Image (cartoon, coloured by chain):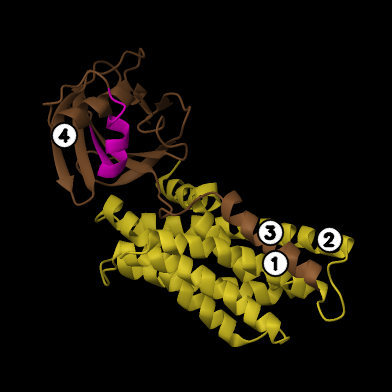
Chain colours: A brown, B yellow
Amino acid sequence: MNVTRSVVAIIAAAAIYLVPGAADAHPLHTTLTEVTVDRSRHTVRAVVRVFIDDLSAGMARQRGVAPSDSLDVRATMYIESSFAIADAAGKPVALRSCGVRKNHELLWVCVEGAVPGDIRALSIKNSLLCDVFSDQVNIVNLLAFGTGQSGRSVLFTKGDRAKPLF
Amino acid sequence: MNEIATYIHLGFRHIVDVEAMDHILFLVALAAIYRLRDVRSALGVVTAFTIGHSITLALAVTGVVRLPSALIEFLIPITIVATGIENLIASARQKEARGGWYRAVLAGVFGLVHGAGFANYLSALFVTRIALPLFGFNVGIELGQVLVLAAAAALLTAIDRVIGWSRLHSGSWPALRVRIVAVSLVVVAVASQWAVERRPW
């Protein structure tokens, strides 16, 4: 069956070029954000966990940063450009940095802000790295204040708009 | 949605994504020797694979074992190559390719390697609160595998039809053997290239 063997060989050779390259290990492009809302103080805090190599790919496209800016500053600027919390009126909550911490392969970036009005009407948008990776998934978990327990979770993928936090 | 649904979604998405070609190719290699009527044998082997990768995932994520990423990422395509070669050897020996406990053991051992591939990622991202993400992610992976296997069954059936239609088979090369050899050669060729490109040295 020379014909059979030839056909099989041609298919095998073609497959090397046709199958998508997976030379790099199959990555999961995911960020995890834990949001804590303090109802008594009317504040919201978000801690974004992002893989540093993914973040570097996103920051490579970043504009308006000075070469002298530190990783912490650039990371916070990048997060603030793609992550937003809005109040009941749809007005963005002004977020300020509350620290950056490196944890092995990840950077934990903390931002927080004061929320005027009904805190239960907050909405959130998280398009972090969606412009870089087509399979990017951003998880936002809402933690109950003071307990660290999570109940509600919101997922964001490319093209998603703002979603209610509660 | 609640948190568990999020992690199920994440695991499912991870497997069915075209970027997960290494995992998909391994499932295709496992499924390549089966016909639709062998579904019970196929499910047994895939279950062994699932048990294997669940064990490693749990051990690695909970910190019981530490696994070097570079080595694991190299070993994953090696398991795919080995499965493809095993398909070819069994086929060449004209053995009853669908039976045998060794294939389930092989799938289980190789599952240990594949599970380690997810482990570093999950343990880095979720740190201490790992139980729920681990469980949900695993459930999502299993659901994704069912979908991938259904797609693989459809693909293999289509290949069988092409082989039958083009009369590539003969008395000494029955249609199933032609299919096993064709699919396994493709799998071995592609995964070999990945192994070379991921070599840790």
The reply to whether callout 1 and callout 3 are in contact (CB within 8 Å) is yes
Distance in Å between CA atoms under marks 2 and 3: 16 Å
| Badge 3 or badge 4: first in the primary sequence | 3
Q: Amino acid at mark 1?
A: Ala
Distance in Å between CA atoms under marks 3 and 4: 48 Å
Q: Amino acid at mark 3?
A: Ile
Q: Is residue A67 above or below residue A107?
A: above
- Name the residue tied to disc 2: B161
Label 1 chain ID? B
- Name the residue tied to disc 3: A11
On whether residue A53 falls in the magenta region, the answer is yes
- Name the residue tied to disc 4: A71
- Name the residue tied to disc 1: B182
Residue at point 81% right, 74% down? Answer: A1
- Left of B30 or right of it: where is A152? left
Q: Are marks 3 and 4 on the same chain?
A: yes
